[in-house]
């Protein structure tokens, strides 16, 4: 049986929480006139919010699980896949921070 370090569970949960926040804020921003910048997700946004969210969460969770399974592997014999797990986490954190800023610009407090 494979054993994976408990830190990967924390990274996975935090990443999925940030992914959920990103989905909610993306839909909110789109309702207020923003456009989807991701060309892969843009076709999904125009349809059902549920389909968009399910695909987004499915792709992210599938990627996270795959990276956790390969956490000890090195890409190009240099970069550990575990580094990519942290990069995705920090990428989502930066994206959510940017979306919070955008919400503040589009929806200023009264």
Image: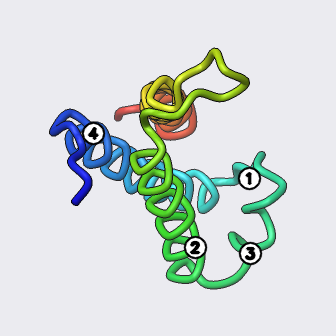
| Label 4 Cα crowd, 10 Å radius (few <14 / some 14-19 / many 20+) | some
Per the rendering, the mark at residue 5 is none
The first of marks 3 and 1 along the sequence is: 1
Which of the 4 quarters of the picture holds residue 31? bottom right
Q: CA distance from mark 4 to mark 2?
A: 22 Å
Q: Count the numbered circles shown.
A: 4
Q: CA distance from mark 4 to mark 1?
A: 30 Å
Marks 2 and 1: CB-CB under 8 Å? no
Q: Nearer the viewer, residue 74 or 105?
A: 74
| Circle 3: element type | loop
Which of the 4 quarters of the picture holds residue 79? top right
Outermost residue toward the left in this view:
6
Q: Nearer the viewer, mark 3 or mark 2?
A: 2
Q: Is residue 44 left or right of residue 22?
A: right
Outermost residue toward the top in this view:
78
The first of marks 2 and 1 along the sequence is: 1
Per the rendering, the mark at residue 46 is 3
Q: Which residue is mark 2?
A: 55
Point 51% across, 57% down: residue = 60
The first of marks 4 and 3 along the sequence is: 4
Please provide percent x and percent y for residue 63: 53, 55
Q: How is the image coloured?
A: rainbow
Point 35% across, 52% down: residue = 16
């Amino acid at each position: 049986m494979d054993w994976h370090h408990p830190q990967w569970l924390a990274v996975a949960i935090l990443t999925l929480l940030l992914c959920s926040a990103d989905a909610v804020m993306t839909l909110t921003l789109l309702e207020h006139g923003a456009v989807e910048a991701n060309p892969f997700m843009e076709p999904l946004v125009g349809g059902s919010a549920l389909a968009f969210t399910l695909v987004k969460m499915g792709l992210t969770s599938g990627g996270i699980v795959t990276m956790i399974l390969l956490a000890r592997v090195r890409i190009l014999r240099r970069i550990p896949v575990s580094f990519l797990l942290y990069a995705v986490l920090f990428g989502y954190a930066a994206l959510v921070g940017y979306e919070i800023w955008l919400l503040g610009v589009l929806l200023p407090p009264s």
